[in-house]
Image: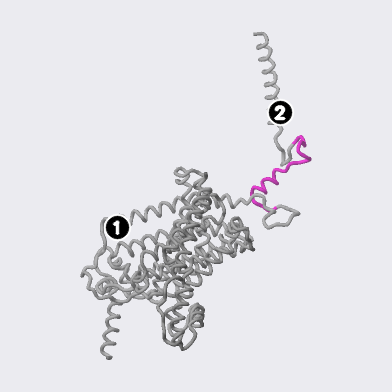
């Protein structure tokens, strides 16, 4: 069995199972948490407040734009770049088709390059902020840096493999992605799924009081 | 025995015939560009091949840029310059800089804050400046390592990891180098505008230079940036932009009609990169290891008051004067 077969075979299955079960376990655990009954009469709909909060916090608002602009803009750059690559990169589309039979039109190569530039730029800028901003540095811990580092590694090895020059580079990229998938459910990377629940929860709590900040 | 003798005679006869044929062929040299014998057509013009070798375009009836040039002779010159003087002189320059830094450290040691740390912090760089600086620094390291691997990897790595292994590594390095290049250009623009203020040369720089920056003893006064830092700023900007623009030309070869310009871009890219990395090593040494307390300005944004007094005394006085004016105003 070659290194590539190993990373696209047994390693991939293990990573996929850990990722899927881990993410599902976390989400079920959050949904199963009991929330203390609040017998106060709602001034407004908590459901409306929850949904409003999900969308409201997607854009900068309120009086703190100058302080949040950096991580909002950089965060969007990174996430848009990453998801464009993940979902529309030609190699990824081919990989998804291989495993699911589903396929769609991939991006052209120049689109992949631009998406990669944006994603890398965003990630590096976010990581730099973790080190240089006094407050963000204080609230960042090992988990944040490991998560960012593994994401960077997966993107970097993907960049190395862009020329499709060898099976070895593809295998190294697969391995780095699998490491990321193994770490994902046990880290704050789970925010990719849980941000909706946390925003809804806070929005509903405030919405019940009649105001969503 | 008789059979062997007969075979030997036959073989010698065939050999002699072949040799005489060769002699005849050698005797019929081309005359005035014409090959005698008309074995390959009516004529075989040696001048044509000389023109081809010289890289002159010929007449063709197929479309395609550069298709009329069979051999681009400047390519050979480019290859010889890249693998010859650039690689060799560049290698010596980089090695020399590393040796000089080590020697300086061995002789001078780490430049300590003489008065010790006061515990009073003075803000030096804004968050925007720090982010811009580290963004460029991260890309500088990524591009520097991949670039050096592409230029010098062939001289050692194939012996360690084999030719195939090196080919894979070089391909990976090239992809990363090409991808991070345009980001470097964007980050340089940000860095230029965030660091321009204070980097204009002034008369204090003459005195700083006269005292060799105090690196060999004594005190050299300076404002927010000293003469060395200002030089580094302008050098990194000019070399950085030269690197970026020549890199863009190499990243997108379709932008140019002429391959010769690409070869010039490649050579200027390599020369600028080697100088940039060499001077950058000195900057990294002084910023991170060589001068106690310097790196804090770029990590936390603040420096110790005693560090400011010792290295940028004129700026320190300005800050203190502003502070006094503010407190006096209250």
- Provide the residue span drawn in magenta: B36-57
Q: Is residue B92 left or right of residue B107?
A: right
CA separation, marks 2 and 1?
A: 71 Å
Between residues A78 and B32, which one lies in front from this camera angle?
Answer: A78
Q: Is residue B46 magenta?
A: yes
Tag shown at residue B24: 2
Which residue is at a point 56% across and 55% down the rendered structure image?
A163
Pick whichever, B66 or B132, lies toward us: B132
Badge 1: chain ID: B
Few, some or many residues within 10 Å of mark 1 (<14, 14–19, 20+) = some
Q: Are marks 2 and 1 in contact (CB under 8 Å)?
A: no
Element type where label 1 sits in the image: helix
In the depicted view, which residue is nearer to us: B51 or A50?
A: A50
Q: Which residue occupies 28% across, 91% down?
A: B329
User: Are there few (<14), some (14-19), or many (20+) residues within 10 Å of tag 2?
Assistant: few
Which residue is depicted at the point 31% across and 69% down? Answer: B296
Which residue, given by chain and number where applicable, does mark 1 sit on? B104
Location of residue B136 (image quadrant) = bottom left
Mark 2 or mark 1, earlier in chain: 2
Q: Where residue A179 sits: x, y (%)?
A: 45, 57
Subunit of label 2: B
Residue lying farthest to the right in this orientation: B42
Q: Which corner quadrant holds the N terminus of chain B?
A: top right
Residue found farthest to the bottom: B330
């Amino acid at each position: 069995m070659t290194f590539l077969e190993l990373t696209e075979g047994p390693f991939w299955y293990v990573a996929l199972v850990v990722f899927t079960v881990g993410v599902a376990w976390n989400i079920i655990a959050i949904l199963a948490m009991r929330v203390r009954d609040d017998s106060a009469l709602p001034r407004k709909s908590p459901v409306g407040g929850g949904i409003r909060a999900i969308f409201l916090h997607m854009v900068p608002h309120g009086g703190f734009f100058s302080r949040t602009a950096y991580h909002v803009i950089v965060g969007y750059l990174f996430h848009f770049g990453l998801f464009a690559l993940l979902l529309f990169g030609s190699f990824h589309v081919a990989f998804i088709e291989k495993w699911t039979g589903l396929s769609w039109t991939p991006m052209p190569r120049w689109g992949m390059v631009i998406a990669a530039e944006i994603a890398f730029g965003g990630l590096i800028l976010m990581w730099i902020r973790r080190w240089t901003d006094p407050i963000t540095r204080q609230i960042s811990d090992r988990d944040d840096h490991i998560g960012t580092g593994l994401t960077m590694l997966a993107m970097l090895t993907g960049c190395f493999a862009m020329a499709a020059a060898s099976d070895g580079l593809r295998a190294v990229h697969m391995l780095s992605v699998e490491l990321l998938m193994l770490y994902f459910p046990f880290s704050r990377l789970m925010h990719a799924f849980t941000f909706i629940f946390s925003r809804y929860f806070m929005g509903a709590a405030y919405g019940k009081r009649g105001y969503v900040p | 025995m008789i059979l062997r003798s007969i075979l030997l005679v036959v073989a010698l006869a065939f050999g002699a015939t072949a040799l005489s044929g060769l002699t005849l062929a050698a005797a019929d040299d081309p005359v005035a560009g014409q090959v005698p014998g008309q074995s390959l057509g009516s004529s075989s013009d040696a001048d044509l091949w000389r023109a081809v070798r010289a890289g002159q375009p010929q007449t063709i009836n197929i479309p395609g840029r550069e298709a009329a040039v069979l051999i681009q002779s400047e390519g050979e010159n480019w290859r010889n310059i890249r693998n010859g003087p650039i690689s060799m002189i560049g290698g010596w320059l980089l090695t020399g800089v590393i040796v000089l830094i080590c020697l300086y450290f061995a002789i001078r040691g780490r430049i300590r804050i003489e008065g010790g740390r006061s515990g009073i912090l003075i803000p030096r760089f804004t968050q925007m400046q720090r982010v811009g600086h580290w963004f460029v620094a991260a890309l500088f390291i990524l591009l520097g390592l991949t670039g050096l691997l592409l230029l010098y990897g062939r001289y050692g790595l194939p012996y360690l990891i084999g030719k195939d292994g090196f080919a894979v590594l070089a391909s990976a390095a090239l992809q990363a180098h090409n991808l991070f290049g345009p980001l470097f250009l964007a980050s340089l623009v940000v860095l230029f505008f965030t660091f321009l203020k204070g980097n204009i040369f002034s008369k204090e720089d003459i005195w700083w230079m006269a005292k060799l920056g105090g690196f060999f003893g004594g005190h050299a006064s300076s404002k927010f940036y000293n003469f060395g830092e200002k030089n580094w700023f302008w050098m990194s900007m000019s070399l950085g932009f030269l690197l970026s623009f020549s890199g863009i030309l190499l990243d997108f070869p379709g932008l140019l009609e002429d391959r010769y310009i690409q070869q010039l871009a490649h050579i200027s890219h390599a020369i600028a990169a080697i100088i940039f990395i060499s001077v950058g090593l000195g900057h990294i040494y002084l910023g991170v290891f060589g001068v106690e307390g310097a790196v804090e300005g770029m990590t936390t944004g603040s420096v110790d008051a005693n560090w400011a007094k010792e290295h940028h005394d004129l700026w320190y006085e300005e800050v203190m004067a502003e502070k006094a004016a503010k407190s006096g105003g209250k």
